[in-house]
Amino acid sequence: MNMTAHSACITKSDIGIPPPCHPPPSVVRSSTLMTSASTTLAGPPVIPREQFFKLKEWPAASGGFGHVYQCIMRPPAGPDVEVAVKAIFCLTDDASKKRARREMKLWMQARHENIVPMLGITEGFSEEGFAMVSPWMKGGTLADYVEGHKGNMPFMKKLTLIKDIASGLAYLHSRQIVHGDLTTRNIILDDSERALLIDFGLSNVLGGMVGSCLSLSAARPGAVRFAAPELLGMGEQTSRPTGDGIPVEDQLPMPDMPSDIYSLGCVMLNILTEKHPWSRYRDLAVAGAHHSRKLIPIPDHSHLSRKRKQFIRKCTSIQVSKRPSSQDAVTFIQEELRIEANAPQQSKPDEHSYTIVIAGAVGSGKSSLVNLLSGKHVAHTSNDARRCTTKWRDYSISFGDTAYKVFDTVGFVCSNDSPLGPKERSEKYAKQQIKAIHEQGGIDLLLLCTPSRNFRVETVLNDYQRIQDELRGRQVPVVLVVTHFEEPFTIESWWSTNSSTFRAQLNSIANHICITSIHDKYLDESREHIFQMVAQYHTPNARQ
């Protein structure tokens, strides 16, 4: 089995591709309305249950409000549409459903490029009974996107995402709508990776109704890292309590515009640092930190300038009155984008593209190492040695602020020592390829892959000698990368068996030894470990 890497954390929302019997779903635009839906003045259109067909019986995602199902909507006239149907938990009686319809009508009326359009509601969809319908967004949640692109998200992309979010929030606030649950789980990406807000229809309008069970969303477990302290009953409170018939001392305040701004600051922090807000705290400890009036920790990061830290600190101020408006946030981010776009190319740090060459036997996991470094599947991999790389090629990869050019080379020999036929492998590409790459502009680092199974020192030494023959005396640091660990626990066992051999025979050829794991839990750790090691060669005199 070749070592594999993933481009993103795979979530349940990634599954459920329409079966062949369904025609391709059409694109839903914000103005789409089902002709068969009945409309009342009290709320959004009600779409008949029989128009929906689940792609999977189980939910694509679950949250504090309910379950989300990926469905095909089949109206009586018009093409099939891929939609998300969210069954709500807490609407159990007619009165609560009536109030919710009035809230959701606000969502129906919202028209903005950074707002997920709402198509209507449906009843009888699940045992919860009440469900909202919106277009299915294939880009997934912002939380999954940030996690999947950790260490590999350009700064301009981060600013663009923040601008999208701030613009959507400013639009809501201009209509006197409070989101009330702004987290990276309630921000969705479309096919073009544009960020859109969702679930704001479950919050209240300023001056609107009291007592909606949905207005508690910002204080629910799981969103506590993004919740303003006043929503947790701590700090300065500016909004009224949430429920009728409940003792005042037992009630939580409603979300409002300042609490949305606090959440926006947390989202900005999450995107720029690629870490969760209060990352060193457990969920329960976050509430305790708020109770102690602690400020949210803002870690150091290359994408967090002093100016950006100060703005996030203003957004997350304990003093509600000192928080900026959502329009202030839009203005701030637009200025940051303008400055970044106009910055002279030569003034940006770490813009030099470092060249890394991956070499080794055919089937040693070279292409899979490319995918691990990239953080996504860019190079073909296979268990069949006859289908390995047949011509060296380069990949542009970034980690943090550093750009890399990574070359995947043709394997020296097949890992099982069986020769490849002329149609499978061209010797002209295998010979002198490292020399040719070096002559194009130099090599900063060479990663020599060797599989853990059937490991032989002689093979490593032979591969190393091939490299040195092509370099012809040029000094290039070499790191030995051991691959093909299918289970994490085998690493320790393998190393205990072979460490003495490395120390005795291979320390002289390899500057470092790096062991990687294909276990999902350790992919990010392996990637971060490799780049930490690679960073040691980012010196002006590294090339010779």
Image: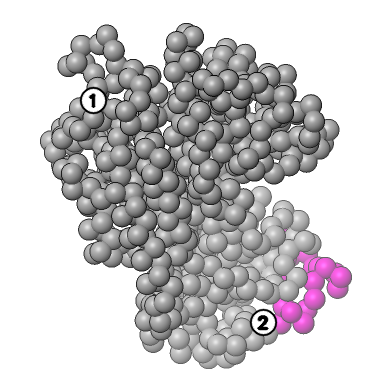
| Numbered badge on residue 180 | none
Label 1 sits on residue: 240
Q: Position of residue 256 (x, y in %)?
A: 30, 35
- Label 1 amino acid? Arg
Question: Is 419 included in the stretch rendered in magenta?
Answer: yes
Q: Residue at x 34, y 46 (%)?
A: 264
Q: Is residue 542 above or below residue 127?
A: below
State the predominant SS element of the stretch in magenta.
loop
Label 2 sits on residue: 433
Which is more N-terminal, label 1 or label 2? 1
Q: Residue at x 61, y 32 (%)?
A: 119
Q: Position of residue 58 (x, y in %)?
A: 62, 24
Residue neighbourhood size for the residue with mark 2, other residues' Cα within 10 Å, grouped as few (<14), some (14–19), many (≥20): some
Residue 219 shows up from this direction: no
- Distance between the alpha carbons at the discs numbered 2 and 1: 70 Å
Q: Residue at x 18, y 48 (%)?
A: 322
Q: Is residue 59 above or below residue 534?
A: above
Outermost front residue: 41
Residue 46 shows up from this direction: yes
Q: Position of residue 313 (x, y in %)?
A: 22, 52
Front position in the image: 59 or 193: 193
Considering the numbered disc 1 on the image, is that residue within a helix, a strand or a loop? loop
97 vs 390, left or right, is: left
Q: Is residue 5 above or below residue 24?
A: below
Question: Is 403 included in the stretch rendered in magenta?
Answer: no
- Label 2 amino acid? Gln
16 vs 349, left or right, is: right
Which residue range is magenta in the image? 413-431
Considering the numbered disc 2 on the image, is that residue within a helix, a strand or a loop? helix
Front position in the image: 342 or 210: 210
Q: Position of residue 193 (x, y in %)?
A: 55, 53
443 vs 250, left or right, is: right
